[in-house]
Image (cartoon, helix red, strand yellow):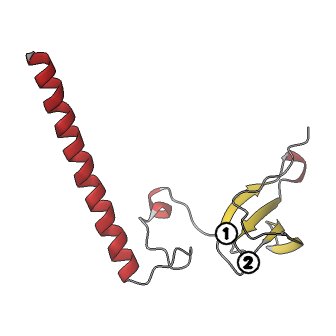
Amino acid sequence: RRAGKRKEQVLTAKMDEAKQKLQALKDELSELKAKGNNGCFETANAPNLASSNNMKARRQLRGHFGKVYAMQWAGSGAAEELVSASQDGKLIIWNANTTLKKQAIPLRSSWVMTCAFEQAN
């Protein structure tokens, strides 16, 4: 009976800790919304992951009119290409070195959540 009570106390403590973390995340999200963050990369005030990983933006691809939901690098044969899917209803194939659009593919629906290249051998 004591073991069951101890497990219950441990679970209650873990649940309380999770609730506190959830509340902290909600508060952080509210702060970001108050600052006008609309979820776009340019205005995102998310934790600065770039500085912690020594990453630096080298190029910026411009061409979509909606939020970008997915991006995928091409296979080993065309490693300089990538494809992006956006809320604007387009897939765009990019040359990552020059940042130029190679092809824009209009879609029947803007409900595209992912994209991929065929990984040919």
* Residue 75, placed above or below residue 94: above
Q: What kind of element bears circle 1?
A: strand
Q: Which mark is residue 30?
A: none
Tell me the amino acid under the disc marked 1.
Answer: Val
Relative to the observer, which residue lies in front, 108 or 55? 108
At 67% across and 69% down in the image, what residue appears?
68
Q: Which mark is residue 68?
A: 1
Q: CA distance from mark 2 to mark 1?
A: 7 Å
Q: Quadrant of the N terminus?
A: top left
Q: Is residue 9 above or below residue 94?
A: above
Residue found at the very far front of the displayed protein: 1
Residue 65 location (% of width, % of height) = 71, 81
Seen in the image, is 37 located left or right of residue 77?
A: left
Q: Nearer the viewer, residue 104 or 4?
A: 4
Name the kind of residue labelled 2 in the image: His
Q: Give coordinates of residue 16: x percent, y percent.
A: 19, 46
Q: For the residues labelled 2 and 1, say whether their Cβ atoms are less than 8 Å apart.
A: yes
The residue drawn where x is 76% and y is 79% is: 63
Q: Which residue is depicted at the point 37% across and 69% down?
A: 29
Q: Residues within 10 Å of mark 1 (few under 14, many from 20)?
A: many
Quarter of the C terminus within the rendering: top right
Label total for image: 2
In the image, 33: left or right of 59?
A: left
Percent coordinates x, y for residue 120 in the rendering: 91, 42
Q: Residue furthest left?
A: 2
Residue position for label 2? 64
Element at label 2: loop
Left or right placement of residue 25 versus residue 52 in this view: left
Front in this rendered view, residue 1 or 59:
1
Residue 54 in the image: x percent, y percent?
A: 51, 59
